[in-house]
Amino acid sequence: MGPVREIPLKIFGNKPVIRIRDINSVVNNYKIFKDKAKKTNSTCAAVLKGDVHGLIMKDVAPLLYKEGARDFFIEELFEGIELRNILPYKDVSIYALGGLLRGEEDYFFDNDITPCVNSIDQLIRWNTYCSINNKRDVLIHLDSHMNRLGLLDDSVNYLSENFESLTSNLNVVAYLSHFFDIKGDDHSNCNMQLNILKKYLKILPVRKVSMACTDSVILLDNSSVNFDIVRIGIGITGGAPSKNKPVSKNAKHTMEIYARYSQIKTVKKGDTIGYGGAYTTLKDTKIALVHIGYKDGYMRVLSGLDEKYGAYMNIAGYRADVIGKISLGATVIDVTDIPSEVLNDNFYAEVVGPNVDIKDLADIVGCYEILVSLGRPNKKFKDFTMDEFKELSY
């Protein structure tokens, strides 16, 4: 069990939920991956898309820069512009994974953001634009049969045959691709993708290559997958392929959520809990209502139902399982095994934190969508960095 965080009532104020973002732990996690990348002579780039999975880019980016990060990936252009305003330094490279949408050329050029082009059309438009203005960088996304972003076989062949004319006004920094089936122990699809990527690289002019992200750095042979640039996103938040496969025992949690509870009562054996009567009590059960629900990012798939276990919370070191369907703004937990004096002396449950591993919730949800969901701006939450929280608490 992890430490129980003591939170003064004044910290909640008039809000039922507080969120604490530990930015120093983000830096700690980045350093773990940077050390792994160093062993293969690879650059460790930070992926900050989704506002760093809810950890807030304006707080995270400056500390990563201070730690030595100079290469950053975001999803869309508008994120890149925000990041450029945060890090207006000439030695910072910002790459937009979403590609170059029509009409965005001026914005990319004026804000010194590099598109990761995902089609021949995007490459032609950026090359044409730069012929009129000035030569600029580009990354080219190769689709190693994930069948999502990037150039597939025919387009790669066309690029190979016309590389000089298609990139005459561009500096091709790197090729990138992405694994689509990395979790678990069967990595046959990863090997298939590596073979396809290597086939592409054989017919293209030599440039840097980026394939590995968080899960592949943890699970696969780094000497085979790291190439020149690793792109670490969920890893800097403390995420990993699963709870049982962390990047390091030194990786740290980066977000904590605490929500007030109320209305403690006992329901009879055989009664149902919540909408649809989807959970039936197997004994007389003491329950509490926690003031967080699916509109707050606490996703309904975390519900504990008759046919499946759900998530859990923690009160003063005691586990409390989620039972019944999670509602719009509230969740029921089973507090039968928690002493009455503990329930009376406390007033909040740990939703995510030292005793409720975000990796457990991610395993239930299937991905780290849960972290993004809980990290979104929310008027119901009081939001702090860990440093701000400690300053107010003591």
Image (cartoon, helix red, strand yellow):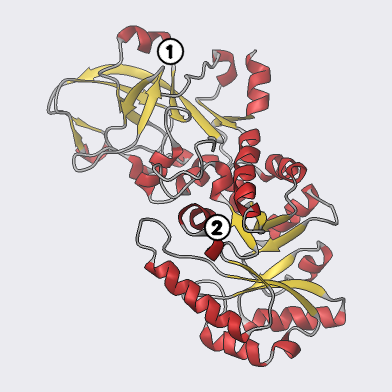
Q: Nearer the viewer, mark 1 or mark 2?
A: 2
Q: Quadrant of the N terminus?
A: top left
Around disc 1, counting alpha carbons within 10 Å, would you say few (fewer than 14), some (14 to 19), or many (20 or more)? Answer: some
When asked about the image quadrant of residue 163, the answer is bottom right
In the current view of this chain or complex, which residue is farthest to the bottom? Answer: 161
- Label count reads 2
Tell me the number on the disc at residue 213.
2
Q: Residue at x 41, y 36 (%)?
A: 293
Around disc 2, counting alpha carbons within 10 Å, would you say few (fewer than 14), some (14 to 19), or many (20 or more)? Answer: many
State the image coordinates of residue 296 (x, y, percent, origin top left): 47, 38
Regarding residue 146, the answer to whether it shows in the image is no
Q: Residue at x 59, y 53 (%)?
A: 232
Tell me the number on the disc at residue 49.
none
Left or right, residue 382 beside residue 59:
left
Q: Residue at x 53, y 53 (%)?
A: 214
- The three-letter code of the residue at mark 1 reads Asn
Secondary structure found at label 2: loop
Above or below: residue 208 compared with residue 343: below
Q: Quadrant of the C terminus?
A: top right
State the image coordinates of residue 81 (x, y, percent, origin top left): 75, 56
- The three-letter code of the residue at mark 2 reads Cys
Above or below: residue 240 compared with residue 190: above
Secondary structure found at label 1: loop
Above or below: residue 81 compared with residue 190: above
For marks 1 and 2, give the CA distance.
Answer: 41 Å
Left or right, residue 175 beside residue 330:
right
Of the two numbered discs 1 and 2 on the same chain, state the one appearing first in sequence: 2
Residue on which the image places disc 1: 346
State the image coordinates of residue 266 (x, y, percent, origin top left): 23, 17
> In front: 295, or 1?
1
Q: Residue at x 59, y 45 (%)?
A: 236
